[in-house]
Image (tube, rainbow, N blue to C red):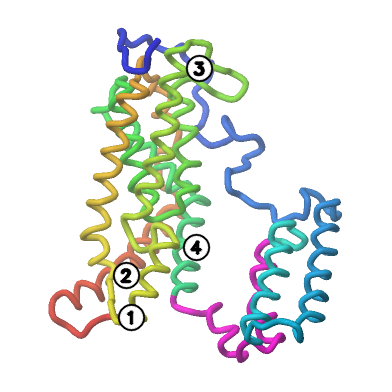
Amino acid sequence: MAAGEMDDPQPLPEPSTASSLSGADVYPEDKRPGDCCFSCGGGDTLGLRQWFGAALAVLFGIGFAVGETKTNLPEAQYRTLAVTSVVATLWICEVLPIPITGMLVGPLLYLSGVCSLEDALSPYMSNLTLVLFGSSMIALAMERHGLDFRFADAVASCRWVGKSPTRLRGAIMVAGCLLSMWITNTGATYILTPIVMRSMGATRGRPLHSIRAQQTLTGSLLSVAYACNCGGMGTMVGTPSNLVVTRYLAEEGVHIGFVSWLTFGVPAALLVTAVCYGSLFLCYRPQTAANVEVLHSSHPVAWTRGEKAVLGSFLLTLGLWIIPSIYSLAGGPGHQ
């Protein structure tokens, strides 16, 4: 059947039990996509790839040290190239846990004489790093206490969605766009994927046999991926690349406040999300009715203490991000 053809929506079979919408139904052992155990080769011992990487890194170090007197490159450039080669080898082969490898760059640049100790270590405590750390902590707290799932469930189970797969897809994309403005795109995708899978009756160990259902599920999962990527451009903390850009612009004397970014970021994110929705509707038009009943029992009604604390912390942080920008827009001294 062609993607654009549309028959009467066929209801999906009811799942045997209305279990929680957590990732356990889709991802084994609560393993989230993008989660990293930071282990070497997936175990406690080094594998062949790690041993090869360690040997290659040592050879790179020795080779650059021996060849330093024979190069025409400036000393700083040559030693920076040497550090980059060694670190890249350790990173690609995962000889050490990835975060530890990343922390080696500054000390190696200092020990090789490329820069001073202050220049080598200052990026680890820069404004960019602290903002990334703070926003990541908020995102992790939301995921830990289920506040993100509560929000996604509330959007997906709105009355206006009904059993319409078209409206459900739109609601899921709105939820993904809004969530990824504040948490990582990967985290937002993880939150929404089980909701889509459950609403389509495609739980783990229960594949879809209907071509219509498979096509609808494909479009819905792609909509989650697209919406979560689109939402990342909505706020300064939506994705690390936004913060990197604002940092370099600030160094050139162009300061973009949090509210200033919202004024063009949010409309742009929503517009691109709408374009993606229209494209997916044409290519993967929903042809099976959604089973939204499973969305209503996915989260306890009462708010937990942890959810309240995380929500309060998020609103406080959001206010501290926004107030300086509003003050600056109102004519106060520029906030840098």
Q: Whole-Å distance between the Cαs marked 3 and 1?
A: 57 Å
Q: Residue 242 has which mark? A: none
Q: Which residue is mark 4?
A: 137
For image coordinates 73% across by 69% down, the residue present is: 86
Question: Cα distance, mark 4 to mark 1?
Answer: 29 Å
* Residue type of the residue flagged with mark 1: Glu
Going by the image, does 50 lie left or right of 116?
Answer: right
The residue labelled by disc 1 is 252
Highlighted range, magenta: 98-127
- Relative to residue 161, is residue 111 depicted above or below? below
Mark 3 or 1, which is nearer the eye?
Answer: 1
Element assignment for label 2: helix
Residue 158 occupies quadrant: top left
- Judged from the image, the secondary structure of the residue bearing numbered disc 4 is helix
Give the mark, 4 or 1, whose residue is nearer the N terminus: 4
Q: CA distance from mark 2 to mark 1?
A: 22 Å
**Which residue matches tag 3?**
15
